[in-house]
Amino acid sequence: MKDKKLFNPENFFSQRKLKMWQSCQREYFLHYYAAYGEYDAAVSDEDDFHIHLLKSIKTEDEFISAIVVESLKELFEAHVNIENLPKLLLNNFNKDCNNMLLGEFEFDHKCPLLFDFYYGGNGTIEELFSKIRERLIKFGTNLADNEFFRKLFYRDKLNFYPIEDEAPSISIGNLVVYADLLALIKDGKNFYFLSFKRDDLDFIRFFHLYYGVHKLHLQADWIKTLVLDIHSGEISELADKQTPISEVIAYISNSYSEIPKLDCTADFRAFPKVDDEKQCLNCRFKELCC
Ligand code: SF4
């Protein structure tokens, strides 16, 4: 059994962490405490294996987002023609499907595992894969055709991953704050930060500004925010209306203090289930919890 006293899942903040806490405390405990860190066969038991396996399950949007991240990285690094994007997306999708069909996720929890593949959805596996393939083609074609993105793509490109080995983060006091960042594209004196479009646009803009100013030492007025719609492949620039940085820092501090520190060794059943059990239908831990 792992020594859970060594774990410290507490001193970081992300919108996902906050939303999960607010949505289901039991899911939050399973995700951030019971399945904290990477599964290590040398020190873990069967329960740990099961919890880590369930944690690795991706929703369809998360699965597609991971393929998009991988494909954009290849597109930026290989300096290939932008028209290759749909093909890159499909290649990565096929690789993930093969891995999934071979059951690689049973041995390596970083391997892709789709919610509807594991739990079964409305149709067959072939129908599921075909639906995702169509989404990827539409996404890739729209993005490759986007005039604004095409203009930026052929400028100097700075892919994010060579800048940071791990997920991009900023530090506010002792707190580490995470958000997604797909790419950084330089165009003249402007630096375009690209993230997925989510419902927390103020937070995304704040993260870009803080990262650009404090980590890359850029001037705030050079930093532009682009958001990418995972459904349509549309890309748009956020208008320059922002919540002041002091307000976002206060929001992060207040939200973080809303999440209590938990006992890592607790039994997950000690945490309340959600009132509306319909929510459990889409929960990756339902096999363990219900
Ligand atoms: S199955 Fe339901 S109660 Fe259990 S962790 Fe998931 S959402 Fe919460």
Image: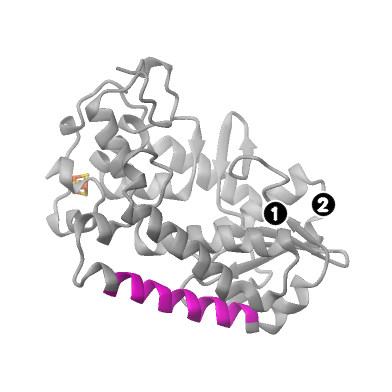
Q: Residue 63: x and y, percent?
A: 41, 59
Is residue 273 shown to the viewer in this render?
no
Give me the disc on residue 128.
none
Amino acid under disc 1:
Leu
Residue identifier under label 2: 218
The structure residue drawn at horizontal position 72% and vertical position 74%, both measured from the top left corner, is 81
Q: Within the image, what quadrant is residue 96 found in? A: bottom left
Q: Reply above or below: 64 against 249.
A: below
Disc 2 residue type (three-letter):
Leu
10 Å crowding of disc 1: few (<14), some (14-19), many (20+): many
Describe residue 47's horizontal placement relative to residue 89 as left or right.
left
Secondary structure under the numbered disc 1 in the rendered image: helix
Q: Secondary structure at mark 2?
A: loop
Choose between 278 and 149: the one closer to the eye.
149
Is residue 139 shown in magenta?
yes
Which residue is found at the position 26% from the left and 23% from the top?
45
Name of the residue lying farthest toward the right: 188
* Residues packed near mark 2 inside 10 Å, few (<14), some (14 to 19) or many (20 plus): some
For the image, the number of numbered tags is 2
**Residue 24 visible in the picture:** yes
Magenta stretch bounds = 127-144
Give the mark, 1 or 2, whose residue is nearer the N terminus.
1
Q: Position of residue 111 (x, y in %)?
A: 41, 47
Magenta stretch: dominant SS? Answer: helix
289 in relation to 179, above or below: above
**Residue denoted by label 1:** 209
